[in-house]
Amino acid sequence: MSKTLSSTLLKGLDVIAAFEDAPALTLSQIAERAGLDRSTARRLTLTLVEAGWARQQGRAFSLAPRVLRPAGAFLQAGSFGRAVQPTLNAHAETLGGEISLAVRDENVAVYVAHSARPGARVSLGLTVGSTLPLDTTAIGQVLKGSDQPAQVIRGAYEAGVCGLAVPIGPPETPQAALGTTLPLALPDLETRLETALAALQMAAADLKDVPGLAPHT
């Protein structure tokens, strides 16, 4: 490890990352997930509690709302509140369903914005900050980059559900992706797929120049 890096900070970040997809953990679970010995995990977790980044209730620990502060700064810098969310809301209304926006973080897709019209089917109940695998989801396949203008994956990640997604920016090097889902049992599925893909592509065109989503030059 480079001498310019702090191993303690990196381990602390591993503790925070251990809570992904886990609302509460014991010290033993934190140690296992973070790849740390129990004494180190205990010291770092209690430090996070003291600093207000985590909470303790009996033997269980959970993250505190303070962890949202840096995430809020990321979203604000990308104009998500001013430009992205209103655009998603408008196109979700046109689509008559849900639209999610994700960016790539190493080997996963991370949801950074989401909109669903009242009564829409919400797949899996994912929220901002939720992650999806790249290989088995349409939105993940788009973020991996290809020469395809869209991706459609049927039932690979969620049984009975068809996922579809389009890139924001060049498909070979997308900065983000937009996706939605449809039940595979729809009698007019192919027609609905065409309509949904067209709606996603219109939304992507409206978002391509948003600073936080525009391709790097």
Image (cartoon, helix red, strand yellow):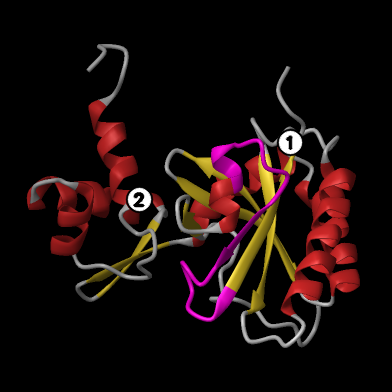
Which residue corresponds to mark 1?
A: 212
The residue shown at (65%, 31%) is 172
Q: Quadrant of residue 76?
A: top right
Main SS, magenta region, reads: loop
Q: Is residue 209 visible?
A: yes
The residue range painted magenta reads 142-161
Circle 1 packing at 10 Å, graded few (<14), some (14-19), many (20+), is many
Residue 183 lies left or right of residue 52; in this view the side is: right
User: Regarding mark 2 in the picture, which secondary structure is present there?
Assistant: helix
Q: In what element is the residue under mark 1? A: loop
Q: Quadrant of residue 190?
A: bottom right
Which residue lies at the image location 74% right of the left edge and 37% below the top edge?
A: 213
Instruction: Report which residue position mark 2 lands on.
Output: 16
**In the rendered view, would you say 70 is above or below 129?**
above
Question: Which residue occupies the foreground of this view, 152 or 142?
Answer: 152
Q: Quadrant of the C terminus?
A: top right
Query: What x and y, as percent, mark residue 157?
Result: 46, 67
Badge 2 amino acid:
Ile
Q: Can residue 116 be seen in the rendering of this structure?
A: no
- Report, in whole angstroms, how far the alpha carbon at label 1 lies from the one at label 2: 25 Å
> In the image, is residue 153 part of the stretch drawn in magenta?
yes
